[in-house]
Amino acid sequence: MKIKNDLLLRAATGVVIERVPVWMMRQAGRILPQYRALRAKAGSFKNVVKDPSLACEVTLQPVDELGVDAAIIFSDILVISEAMNLNYEIIEKKGVFFEETVATKKDVEQLKVVNDLEEIGYTIEAIKLVKQELGDKIPLIGFAGCPWTLFAYMTEGKGSKTFAKARTMLYQTPEVAHELLAMITQSTIFYLKEQIKAGVDIVQIFDSHAGILSPALFHTFALPYIREICEAITEVPIIVFAKGVGYAMEELNSLPCQVLGLDWTMSPQLVRNQIGMEKSLQGNLDPCLLYANPAYIQKATASMLNAFGHQKHIANLGHGLEPTTPLDGIKCFIDTVKAYEYVAS
Amino acid sequence: MKIKNDLLLRAATGVVIERVPVWMMRQAGRILPQYRALRAKAGSFKNVVKDPSLACEVTLQPVDELGVDAAIIFSDILVISEAMNLNYEIIEKKGVFFEETVATKKDVEQLKVVNDLEEIGYTIEAIKLVKQELGDKIPLIGFAGCPWTLFAYMTEGKGSKTFAKARTMLYQTPEVAHELLAMITQSTIFYLKEQIKAGVDIVQIFDSHAGILSPALFHTFALPYIREICEAITEVPIIVFAKGVGYAMEELNSLPCQVLGLDWTMSPQLVRNQIGMEKSLQGNLDPCLLYANPAYIQKATASMLNAFGHQKHIANLGHGLEPTTPLDGIKCFIDTVKAYEYVAS
């Protein structure tokens, strides 16, 4: 099915675009009053994720409301941990919590590699529903967490500023760490391929906690598994968003993926100077900037668009939307991208 | 008074050294059983900080126990916030908590610029006691938080992965932010000068949360105030440790300071290539590495020392010690640095 507004897919694959496409990480969720109402009724975040028709509804909420150029399936990177046999909870105002964590070889052996739809069928069903409802309007983005980020949660058991327990395991028992990372990688490849079969047009993988690794650890425990995923996913374009690893742009540039996401601390111009023009880039406005007044948002957005240039760019934030972001600020950002006229310098 | 072991001061100021000096961020504190016993008796962390004789004792604990080449005064970067009239607590297992935070111009006007010893005299007294006890054995390091990091806590009210409230203020009311930052800067300069009068031989300023700013924000709201402090402190060498801003090494190199601290995500060789040989560098072993076995620690430490070269380097971790780090790992790191023989390549 040919997508009518395929700006995102063209920008991702380096085909000429007449304007820069825009979507936002966490565009479906707490920023929208209609989501907050639906979630209150559903009882919890996980209830929404696990109900295909609710997940479909939430995925579609921002499409007309905000006028974005892509939808992203409403789910959670940790569904894979659960499908591997390690349950988690989202505790109100506290965040992720795993009652049991992985520490030893024996713990790893209790886990399974995901290779059927039994445990993650709900997200695949949700994707099918979204594709039916969305039709050929705009592309649908699938996603998964990168192996290191899932590993960090599964071993630390909760969010953390330093993930010291997770990092310590990489130094103390590297072979056990590699075993777990390989299992996560296999599960993720299966999961992404099922998302693609169900209809997603492009996928993004998130390495949200890449930035707390030393370059040596990133090189050994994160990048090889990202590469394995990129090599396995050949059906659709892939966006790799590794947060906080500005130092590794050249290595990331060597991945067989189409798009690299930049966080808000990276300079688009510096990155272009480093990696050249082969890959497309996504990003990277500071999400906190959307709390500012419209004139400020317009100016900063225009300046960001100029810094990326007009081609091979997908406009986005440099991190997920903060839940309390005012809708006016969000709409101002989107409208500014869509109205932007490129001035060649 | 001429310091007997002045390796740290020579390394900081670019004088030739026969071996690389070593100390560790958070070397005084929870890693030592004798500290844990003292703190249990004192009742709380702040009770130790505010009692000059206890703070002196804790400062000296690692000196013989670990054999480090410098002591660092036991205190807390947030004592300045409290002296400015904004109280905070350290809540067990949760961290920093401010009952009131700064949000408006009116809030800023409730604060005072610190210009007498009334509120911070305890740390100054502790420094005098340490200098008496320590004699001319090794140098004593004084310290303070950088203005942005203090601002982040005073406006956010607690630790945070993103400090979204603090960053939002920079976009919404930049002039109020600058006003608060200027007051913190003046207070910090006063505080550091008093530390120097009391006897510290070198000072370090910590911008622990620099890494969550976009380059534009770092340039506007962090760097100018760091510069102001560096320009004001001419009596002793100054170490600037701005965490997570690998992209800003050239700007940091333009500061009138002697030493730049590197966090564990930065590559010493890349930094040297960028900034040349003028400044000394400090760092940067990943603190989690000290949980590994001795052979691993020795190898990683040697590789780090090689990467920095043998001159203009102060060996340290790339972040504070994790409280549960095994003493054996810590001692292995220190002994490896002290026994290291430089092999010219």
Image (tube, coloured by chain):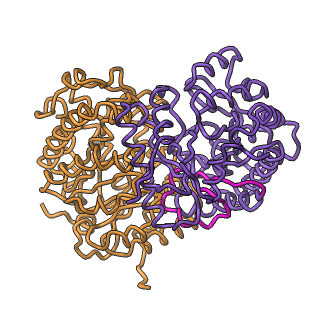
Chain colours: A orange, B purple
Whether residue B331 is situated above or below residue A16 in the rendered picture:
above
Q: Is residue A269 left or right of residue B235?
A: left
Q: Is residue B95 left or right of residue B317?
A: right
**As drawn, which residue projects farthest toward the top?**
B41
Can residue B26 be seen in this snapshot? yes
Front residue of A149/B49: it is B49
* x 29%, y 55%: residue: A240
x, y percentage for residue A185? 20, 41
Task: Look at the image and say whether residue B255 sits in the magenta stretch.
Answer: yes
Q: Quadrant of residue A145?
A: top left
Front residue of A213/B314: it is B314
x, y percentage for residue A270? 42, 69
* x 48%, y 38%: residue: A161
x, y percentage for residue A96? 40, 31
Quarter of the image with the N terminus of chain A is: bottom left
x, y percentage for residue A173? 29, 31
Figure label count: 0
Q: Is residue A175 left or right of residue B188?
A: left
Give the magenta range: B235-259
Q: Quadrant of residue B52?
A: top right
Front residue of B177/B226: it is B226
Whether residue B219 is situated above or below residue A220 in the rendered picture:
below
* x 17%, y 39%: residue: A125
